[in-house]
Amino acid sequence: MEHALWLLWAATLGVTSLLYHYLANTRPRFATGRRRQLPPGPSPLPLLGNLLDLRGGNLHHTLARLARTHGPVMRLRLALTTAVVVSSRDAAREAFTEHDRALSARAVPDMACAAGFADRSVIWLPSSDPRWKAMRGVVAAHAFSPRRLAAARGARERKVRELVSYLRDRAGQEVEVGRAVYGGVLNLVSGALFSADVVDVGAESAQGLRELVEEIIEAIAKPNVSDLFPFLRPLDLQGWRRWTAGRFHKVFRVLDDIVDRRLADASSSSADMQGDFLDALLELVSTGKMTRDDVTTIMFDVFAAGSDTVAITVEWAMAELLRNPSIMAKLRAEIEGAIGSKETVEEPDAASLSYLQAVVKEAMRLHPDGVEIGGYAVPKGCTVIFNAWAIMRDPAASERPDEFVPERFLGREDGTGFRGKELKFIPFGSGRRLCPSLPMAERVVPLISASLLHAFEWRLPDGVSAEELDVNEKFTTANVLAVPLRAMPVVIT
């Protein structure tokens, strides 16, 4: 942890020690008002709690290691706050079955409050809030409904073709797969939802926008005195809230430019409505059902979440395929058998390929974006962390859970769908907080993956064997490759 953070903790020691001892020795009451035994966990230190237990390595790995000692439902004291960590399929099923309504009210980090974001974002508003219900309904009906997705299919397929064209121009050269895919996905999402490109594929502008979004989410995930000692929030001692607000304003300017251009076009009598998600949002503004700030916030919510998830998953899938040549060969055979001489892959093609779907699911199972976090009323006021990485590697749910075996998803309907109903496969979360962009991701990830494999043979850099490919993880904004994947696309003749 950062040296400055330790200094701040030390500085607040005298002020907070009495309060800590009072809270640590007062048994929290559950939502029912009855006193119950709290979950087990490592013994906390005065003031710091279990923060030292979380040092080093990836958070989800560390939490899984602690859970092996303390159990699948584990309590951690994080300074003056409490967290409950869920690490098994059975525990997750019980939590979502019995407490889904409580779990859907997320604990809000202080930095998410920057620029008033948390008060109007579908990501952070509690599901009991009428505003959350209204905004979630808008996203579901106007961005990811079957009708809207069908209408935007041509735009998505066109952006995938542009990504393939970009890579074809670099055939025979090493490329950073994740960076190229991310630029294409940014334009795919913005094109499908807003009928506008935000970057040139693979260009620095793609990286710059991605870095802004990553900086925001990474800052929200950083240790923050304001979250560990909530009574210090008004002081913003580390300046993280002010810093994050500056990044929000930069991203919002990009999105505001898209809105301004659409409004300018709409003022022209000769302009045609695009009929896309942005038009639907502006129609709601014109009828007084939504504000201009709401438009920008919803655009950010769906744009940031949808783009990052798709790009990261495609990179992980490609890394696992390059690491497992026999699986890649089997998948390529399925693609070529179904697509044949067609020049490009279309969404229905990708949806019909069972082994492709299994490969995508297996990549998501082994390498989920990260942990799911929600507020939980037992004990009242604590934070609940669903360690999706540990849950989907639960030996009780899967054989050989640490191996890349797509066959485990073939011919099965036992809770292995994307919507996580049986809690053994939850790459998009579950319950009320199920990721709203799931309908797009389950179409786009297979489409991009199949297109990359149909257009190219993929080779590792000279001197790197499949066995030597580094697939270690690094948890920043999400669970990403510690070393970005570099590979060479070779045009199939």
Image (cartoon, rainbow, N blue to C red):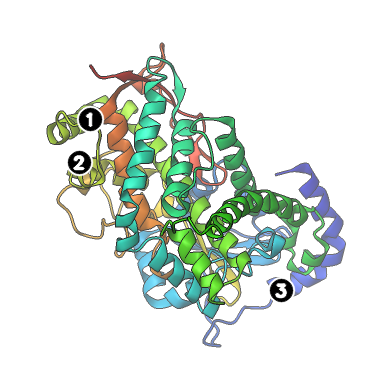
In percent of width and height, residue 297 lies at 58, 61
Mark 3 falls on what kind of element? helix
Q: Which mark is residue 343?
A: 1
Left or right, 244 with respect to 329, comes to right
Q: Specify the quadrant of the image occupied by residue 211.
A: top right
**Where the N terminus falls, by quadrant?**
top right
In percent of width and height, residue 309 lies at 44, 47
Question: Looking at the image, is mark 1 or mark 2 earlier in the sequence?
Answer: 1
In the rendered image, the residue lying farthest to the bottom is: 33
Mark 1 falls on what kind of element? loop
Q: Marks 3 and 2: CB-CB under 8 Å?
A: no
Left or right, 450 with respect to 101, comes to left
Q: Please tell me which residue is depicted at 55% across the width and 72% down the height of the picture.
A: 286
Q: Amino acid at mark 2?
A: Tyr
Mark 2 falls on what kind of element? helix
In percent of width and height, residue 80 lies at 70, 66
Q: Amino acid at mark 1?
A: Glu
Q: Which mark is residue 355?
A: 2
The residue nearer to you, when weighing 68 against 264, is 264
Q: Amino acid at mark 3?
A: Leu
Q: Nearer the viewer, mark 1 or mark 3?
A: 1
Q: Nearer the viewer, mark 1 or mark 2?
A: 1
Q: Please tell me which residue is depicted at 32% across the width and 18% down the height of the picture.
A: 490
Q: Please tell me which residue is depicted at 54% across the width and 87% down the height of the picture.
A: 34
**Which residue is denoted by mark 3 in the rendering?**
23
Dot 1 crowding, Cα within 10 Å, few <14, some 14–19, many 20+:
few
